[in-house]
Amino acid sequence: MLSPSSGMLEDPITGSLNAAIGCWMYSTGQWTKPVVVAQGTCIGRQGRVFLRYHEPSNTVWVGGNVCHLIEGTLTL
């Protein structure tokens, strides 16, 4: 998410990317426990997300603090 008008030139952390990496790491056996991911340090931000694999639904859950700037709906 890039939003120059808000003063934020780069998203400090990308939840969807971390979820995809988490799914891949879980499927290869490289990750099994909840983890905190740090991102954005090089651009002076303290981006953090929390990843947890949810066994019953076979999904990776991503959580953390956000700054909600825009909302939308996509209908396929």
Image (cartoon, rainbow, N blue to C red):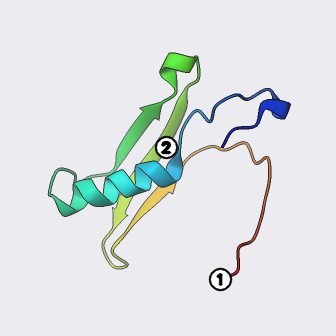
Number of labels in the image equals: 2
Decide which of tag 2 and tag 1 comes sooner along the chain. 2
Where the C terminus falls, by quadrant? Answer: bottom right
The answer to which of 27 and 31 lies nearer the viewer is 27
Outermost residue to the left: 29
Is 4 or 24 nearer to us in this picture? 4
Residue at the spot 76% in from the left edge and 48% down from the top edge: 68
As drawn, 72 above or below 3: below
Where is residue 28 shown, x and y percent of the image? 16, 58
- Mark 1, secondary structure of its residue: loop
Q: Which residue is label 2 attached to?
A: 49
Q: Secondary structure at mark 2?
A: strand
**Dot 1 corresponds to which residue?**
76
> Does residue 57 appear left or right of residue 1 in this picture?
left
Instruction: Classify the position of the N terminus by image quarter.
Output: top right
Looking at the image, residue 31 lies above or below residue 47: below
Q: Is residue 40 left or right of residue 59?
A: right
The residue lying furthest to the front in this view is 76
